[in-house]
Amino acid sequence: MSRQTWFDHTRIEPRWQARWDDADVFRVPDDATDPTYVLAMFPYTSGELHMGHVRNYAITDAYARYRRLRGETVLHPMGWDAFGLPAENAALERDTDPDAWTRRCIEQMREQFASLGFGYDWNREVTTCDPDYYRWNQWLFARFREAGLVEREASAVNWCPSCETVLADEQVEGEAPTTSTGGDGVCWRCDSPVEPRELDQWFLRITDYADELLDGIDELDDWPAGVRDRQRNWIGRTEGAEIPFPVRTPDGERDVTAFTTRIDTIHGATFVALAPDHPLAEAAAERDESVRTFVDQVADPDGDEPQGVPTDMTATNPATGEEIPVFVADFVLSDVGTGALMAVPAHDERDHAFATAHDLPVRQVVEPADGTEVDVRDAAFTDDGVLVNSGEYDGLASAVARERLVADLPGAEATTQYRLRDWGISRQRYWGTPIPVVHCDDCGPVTVPDEELPVELPEFVHTTGNPLDAAAEWQETTCPECGADATRETDTMDTFVDSSWYFLRFVSPDLANAPFDTDRANDWLPVDEYVGGDEHAVMHLLYARFVTMALADLGLLDHREPFDAVLTQGMVLGADGAKMSKSGDNGVSPERIVAEYGADTARLFVLRAARPSKDFVWREEGVQSSHRLLQRVYRMVRSVQNEPADAPETAAGRYVVRETDATVSAATDAYDDRRFERAVREVESLFALLGRYRERDDAEPGVVARGVAAVVRLLAPIAPHVCEEAWRELGQDGFVTTADWPTVANDVTDYERERSLVENTRTDVRQILDVADIDEPTAIDVVVAPAWKHRALEVAGDVTDGDVVGAVMADPELRAQGEAAADFATDLAAEHPGLDATLAPERERAALERAAWLIEDEFHAPVQVLAAEETDDELASKARPGRPAIHVHED
Ligand code: ANZ
Ligand code: ZN
């Protein structure tokens, strides 16, 4: 009976998963020293994994397995981001409660994870909806509050007047009214128009860390550039100045403070503009119907054209003493700067457009520093330059003038503005961490003492509003400070709080007296490689950085940055090119792929389809081809004899051994760069070479066995189950998962050069056959360049003054070659300084000899590698270092 030459994934995958489990191979002991920390963003507990998850987790798993094979202790934990609105909605729809629903989802997802063979240390599992986890959110809230990092402030929420409830943005159909532009969305349940309503809410003062969050980005070298840019923009630091403008109003004189980044242009400020909800705009609207109409009905901050109306107020330009008009305009935003600006039409585009529309003066006060003429009537000149029409400041450079004007103008002050706002963590929802506060009539909002934590969620009730508002009994309590009757806070925390420190909990998931073990966290953090979706590139990463810095300032942690390297993976797109969704019609379920092709195939496919950061389109053929590749590898494994890897005896054998080493070296680099698709490509080409080599009569079994063993280990991080199976077939003990990474036996420095030498030579032969129209060559001569040409190349490579011919001909040995040397030097001069170093002549010849069998195989003709001296002059003269001359014989 013949042995089975294909593997059955439904049989081998569960088997190896169980064995890894039994042997606890992914466990990291608490006393490990500085393990390599590889982390994937933990999933929201929706109940099902989609292909985006598979990709995300395949990336970290392959990387974690690779580092483990390199001999490192690797921490690769997993947990559940288990709070959030969808669980609450699902519970309402299904007549269950969010806790039960979430637990069921977790069970399902855990099984899916297991079926994919991801190697996590499940002893460190973390679930954010466990009171044992969220009590530490509450504890941190208390510490932050003590440290002055918590603020309670009125802020707008979405209010449905008919349901009498606050809505999350996701529950508003259309745009929420609380956005800066004020949307007119409706309630998802009853379709009533949603209104903004002011509520006292809790904020974390992330803005205290704005500078450190911004400046720290410069050091995050292993983060994607795009993520760093987006964080910078989100923080949005602008250096500028605030300057008061005295304003005459019918009610008397008032100061309006304007924020400007260009105080150097103040002599050109020809009007003042106020945001529609500036207090003075509001006062003007009281007095003037046209202002009222504009403020209430016309103003559109998102409009293409800046719009505005004049008012009955005038301002004094503090630099010129001139009387200038005051407008209310919609391009002035209330939450930027002071909500008031000095308009300089000559040097700002929006001011220019507005001035043109309202026929206001445009006065140039800055000229280009290089003396070019500009006409500011046509368009604003917005660059820095040299001041004109600015009295005593004329002739100063913009930057200098800014400093002088801030110092000179009464009341002017240098300021820094940020786009970043404090982090509003209040949610009027049930399924989140209760904010640990008790409201007392006498003492105000009092933090719940640590001994009383966790404040656990009450039982879930079905209501249109916040179930915590309906939990009257739960709310009733006494004030921790004075003992009087008091009520609990009913807001819960934004789930971004949960995820802002979970990577620290993995370090000591069961610790009962602190959120994490400080000593261990100091040793194990930062995360070495953090992988997740691009949609979390701004908020989640910023919140996690902020919390880490705050923890450091609380003395709980030495590190100030949590993530050393970040990788944001690209999307998996459906066949229609749109982002693959699990519910939509372009979705492919991971379960089906695992059932039909196996976890190894699914993992191989998502990792080889594209580099991790790029999007790729799902292709069923790609899945099938990944499956076939694994089957072919397995078949070859089954057919190799277990031979000791003795030194090869034939040139072809030596070639294959070197290629094996070269592949190990290149694939290792690719893994280091997290370029799994490149690692696979390397392995595939070695595998193809082994296949071809085996067909030869003189193929040495030891050479093949050595190559196959390398293939198996190089693929093990990506397709671990079949590689375990193969490893055993190869007669190895233990797991490939915990084996040693293959090492390179020989010096590989020149491998890349050898590879391209062989590649180029094969291409040249192909071209010659094509051009000369030769179908059946009888023999092929490959002629290596003479030693003196190598020497000439070396001499030319050292030339710094550009005189290549001179340098070559100055060398007595080369000069002795006469005209040939002069010709060659001229060629080299033409390519200088782009000359590539090549192999030494003997190495070049040896490399070509080892590869001769490949050329013979391809062209079905014997190949002879010759030195220049062994052939006629004409042919020899064509040979160059790195580019042998080729002569094809035919009948
Ligand atoms: C005078 C000026 C002259 C300005 C000039 C610019 C160029 P950036 O640079 O984008 O950060 N500004 C101030 N408050 C504003 C508000 N509430 N809404 C909209 N715009 C406002 O923006 C800073 C500039 O935006 C400020 O500098 C101000 O215009 C305007 F040649 O002041 B500038
Ligand atoms: Zn009290």
Image: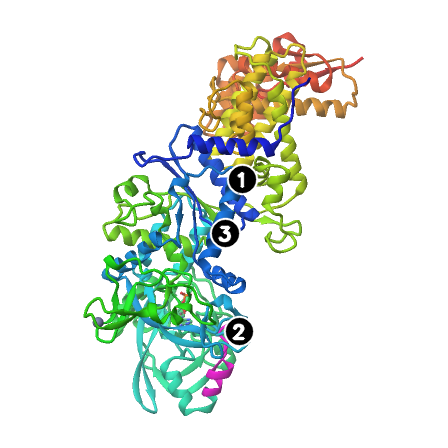
Q: CA distance from mark 2 to mark 1?
A: 43 Å
Q: Which numbered disc, 3 or 2, marks the residue closer to the eye?
A: 3
Q: Which badge, 2 or 1, is on the more N-terminal residue?
A: 1
Mark 3, secondary structure of its residue? helix
In the image, 763 versus 803, the foreground residue is 763
In the image, 675 versus 813, the foreground residue is 675
Return the x and y of residue 307 as percentages of the image width and height. Answer: 50, 79
Q: CA distance from mark 3 to mark 1?
A: 15 Å
Q: Disc 3, disc 1: CB below 8 Å?
A: no
Q: For the residue carrying disc 3, how many other residues have a C-alpha within 10 Å: few (<14), some (14-19), or many (20+)?
A: some
Residue 297 magenta: yes
In the image, 652 versus 568, the foreground residue is 568
Give the quadrant of ligand 1.
bottom left
Mark 2, secondary structure of its residue? loop
Image quadrant where one finds the C terminus: top right
Amino acid type for the residue under numbered disc 3: Cys
Q: Which residue is mark 1?
A: 115
Q: Which badge, 3 or 2, is on the more N-terminal residue?
A: 3
Q: Which residue is mark 2?
A: 185
Q: Which residue is mark 3?
A: 105
Q: Is residue 159 above or below residue 845?
A: below
Q: Which numbered disc, 2 or 1, marks the residue closer to the eye?
A: 1
Query: In this rendering, would 197 be left or right of 453?
Result: right
Mark 1, secondary structure of its residue? helix
Residue 36 magenta: no
Specify start and end residues of the magenta stretch as a single range: 292-308
Q: Disc 3, disc 2: CB below 8 Å?
A: no
Q: Is residue 506 above or below residue 474?
A: above
Q: Which badge, 3 or 1, is on the more N-terminal residue?
A: 3
Query: In this rendering, would 412 be left or right of 544?
Result: left
